[in-house]
Image (cartoon, grey):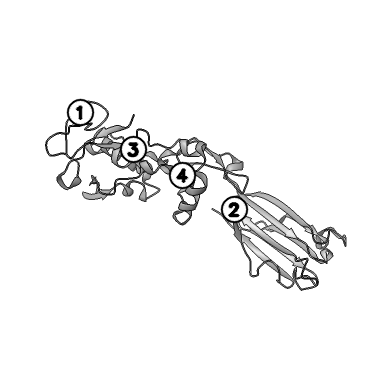
Amino acid sequence: QPLLYCKWQSNKKFKNTTRPNPNFNPCNGSVCGWGQSECSTLASNCSDDCDFKFDLNFIAAKKGCFWITKNKKKASKRKESYCAKSEISNACEATCSSTCENDSSITFEDTWAKKEVNCAWITKNRKKSASRKEKYCVGAAFSDASVNQVYCREACGRCSPNQGAKPTPEESAVNVVFNLHTDNYPQETSWALVDDAAGTVIKSDGARYTGFGDAFEANTLHSEAFALKRCVYYTLTVYDSFGDGLSPSIPTTPGYFEVFVEGQRVMGSSDGVAFGSSDSVEIYVC
């Protein structure tokens, strides 16, 4: 059942009050104390499961609830795409549910800086979000703390960046997908993925490296997937020995290449078609 809570009318700020149970200032039926507004209905459970992981749509990787809104520019589309799945919306309720939004009208005191702050302040600084949640969402020493679990439902219910189960090496890797669609002259095409710091070739293919004239079939899609290390610079280069890129002599059979890093396309200096003798894509995620 939804929980009912009273809110002070005076400037919509919380005041010290007796707390007879873990729920701060609960309504007694539908009646609030003197100086308080009517009871408001709030969601009974607004918390994310910080150990929960789900599969991404386009790449072989798992992410937690925090990832959905980690990138503010992509948060809306990610919520639309992933929160529509019941398994994710149930586990990531603070992130996905519209009933778990922060009350933007509420302010409380930052006890260190002695200034008024709002719910969004709790998670504004990612490095401090965990300690702020511990202090202002569950800290028993402050009367405002338990209040924030009610009115700062999203901020207090969401997971911190480093909270939850530690990722496996596969989950922490940078997922890269490379697609090469050859043109009419596949014997001219080669590619190589290089670790820039070590100067070593991770993988390569094509006549330039194999020594065979027909390393690829004409007008065929070839795909490669890589799990690369974070905070390491890589370069993937596609070569054309004739010098006209993958531009075909017959327009109906176009060639191209594309590189996706964590599901997002990353481009070099060309469109992946007309690049002359070579085109390189830099890969770096940290």
Residue type at mark 3 is Glu
Answer with the quarter of the image where residue 101 lies. top left
Q: Residue furthest front?
A: 30
Task: Give the image location of residue 76, x and y in percent.
Answer: 46, 52
Q: Mark 3 vs mark 4: give the one in front.
A: 4
- For disc 2, the marked residue is 263
Q: Earlier in the sequence, mark 3 or mark 2?
A: 3
Task: Give the image location of residue 219, x and y in percent.
Answer: 80, 61
Task: Give the image location of residue 160, x and y in percent.
Answer: 42, 42
How far is mark 3 from mark 2, CA to CA? 34 Å
- Marks counted in the figure total 4
Q: Residues within 10 Å of mark 1 (few under 14, many from 20)?
A: few
How far is mark 4 from mark 1, CA to CA? 35 Å
How far is mark 3 from mark 1, CA to CA? 28 Å
Placement of the N terminus among the 4 image quadrants? top left
Give the structural element (helix, strand or loop) at label 3: helix
Residue type at mark 2 is Gly
- For disc 3, the marked residue is 134
Observer able to see residue 50: no
Q: Mark 4 vs mark 1: give the one in front.
A: 1
- For disc 1, the marked residue is 28
- For disc 4, the marked residue is 66
Give the structural element (helix, strand or loop) at label 1: loop
Give the structural element (helix, strand or loop) at label 4: helix
